[in-house]
Amino acid sequence: MYERTALLPVSVDNALAWHARPGAFSRLIPPWQPVLLVKPNDGIGAGATLTMRLPLAGPLGVTWHALHEAPQGFRGFRDVQARGPFNRWEHDHVFEEAGAGASRLVDRVSYRLPLWPISQPVAGWAVRRMLDRMFTYRQDTTRADLARHASLAGGAPMTVAVTGASGLVGQALTAFLSTGGHRVLRLVRREARSADEVSWNPDDAGWDATALEGIDAVVHLAGENIAGRRWSDAHKARVRESRVRSTESLVTALSQLARPPRALVCASAIGYYGASREDSLTEESPAGGGFMAEVCEAWEGAALAAEARGMRVAILRIGVVMSPLGGALAKMMPAFLAGVGGPVGKGSQHMSWIGLDDVVYATHFVLSREDARGPFNLTAPTPVTNREFARTLGRVLHRPAILPLPAAAVRALFGEMGDALLLGSLDVRPRRLEGLGFRFEYPELEGALRHVLGRAAAR
């Protein structure tokens, strides 16, 4: 038997409603152990089912079929393994009142390993450690998500369209918004296949946007992966076109609606400030020079054109996002886990980073505030040097972090992209977010890394 308890900042009814909404399961998947949803969760009521595949190595994986059963003697829900890696697995999600506006979540798991009892002394400790990591993450995320929704409650649920919904930020954002009771429409480049999808053409402003008539807001995240390959002239052209042309297409289509959305929240990047600057940068700092600065200026200018049609426009200048599911951290992890990680170049260059959850929370905050317009730096308030980053990641992973990657090797491997993204130095501060009262969930790098890598101290 395994049991862990968390105090939640909402009533039992609100906590149960959060768990019953479509994005809840996605929000609770540990990012260090990605899960493929073969059949998404269809609720938490008795008879609901869920099928997922847990990757092992390469093409190998384990399929897990779960069935929800009626709770017995408690308020909440129970999921049972119908078929999967355990001989037996029953997970009770128990919700108890804990005073005015608060509740208690008790995760209680009864399980038996294959080949029990022989396997218990051999693998029991590893399973216990896995459960500690998983439920620490799940309960921390549940608590934080509920608190964020509660802090901005009071208005009517929104209908929000999201481009780039299948990307790193898009998947997390759409799941989070749905758990808050908001309706999410995913803009897809293919033909729509469900009621929550809308087909759009980022290369042609003539696409039919009537399905977006009267929605509340659009979050525009779509764009070619900047760090996907070396910056050839062709790749740089794709990066620019995927951001600028898609934004122009989106704004033109929205502007032709009889009732365009009240708000457009458009992604940008801290590359707006250039590759390297000596000064501490805020939203009032001028644009820098170089390829990324030119792209970001044109990107933001295309979005700001929506103001002429009466839309509130907010620009998110996003820093280095911390998640093992993608981006810079995912690329660094293999070397650090192998014990051969370390600083890049001199290591003195500044990294303006942000946790993935704080990107989601800040985007939700900007969406919900009518006074949030113009540029916002989505970076943690505590930028670090590259050397500090390497030491912190090594400490979290219990690995050495002393082998540097020389600047010459970076330039040989990555060319111009390496100079801009790995050797560049930007100290970017989130002055406007903090000025509006936004509170970061993970203001310090070590806490952010421990959360997304499952290395937080079990409470």
Image (cartoon, helix red, strand yellow):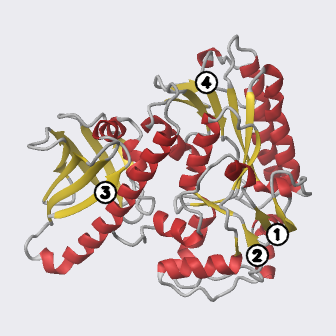
Disc 1 to disc 3, C-alpha distance: 45 Å
Q: Where is residue 159 in the image (x, y as percent from the top left)?
A: 54, 25
Which quadrant would the N terminus be assigned to in this image? bottom left
Mark 1–mark 3 CB contact (< 8 Å):
no
Give the residue type at disc 3: Ala
| 114, above or below 335, in the image | above
Mark 3–mark 4 CB contact (< 8 Å):
no
Disc 2 to disc 1, C-alpha distance: 8 Å
* Residue at x-position 90% and y-position 58%: 290
Disc 1 to disc 4, C-alpha distance: 40 Å
Q: Name the residue under label 4.
A: 216
* Residue at x-position 24% and y-position 55%: 107
Q: Position of residue 123 (x, y in %)?
A: 21, 76
Mark 2–mark 1 CB contact (< 8 Å):
yes
Give the residue type at disc 4: Asp
| 282, above or below 391, in the image | above
N-terminal of the two: label 2 or label 4? Answer: 4
Which quadrant would the C terminus be assigned to in this image? bottom left
Give the residue type at disc 2: Val
Residue 131: quarter of image: bottom left
Side of 429 where 157 appears, left or right: left
Question: Of discs 2 and 3, which sits in the foreground?
Answer: 3
Disc 2 to disc 4, C-alpha distance: 44 Å
Spot the residue most to the top: 258
Q: Name the residue under label 1.
A: 419
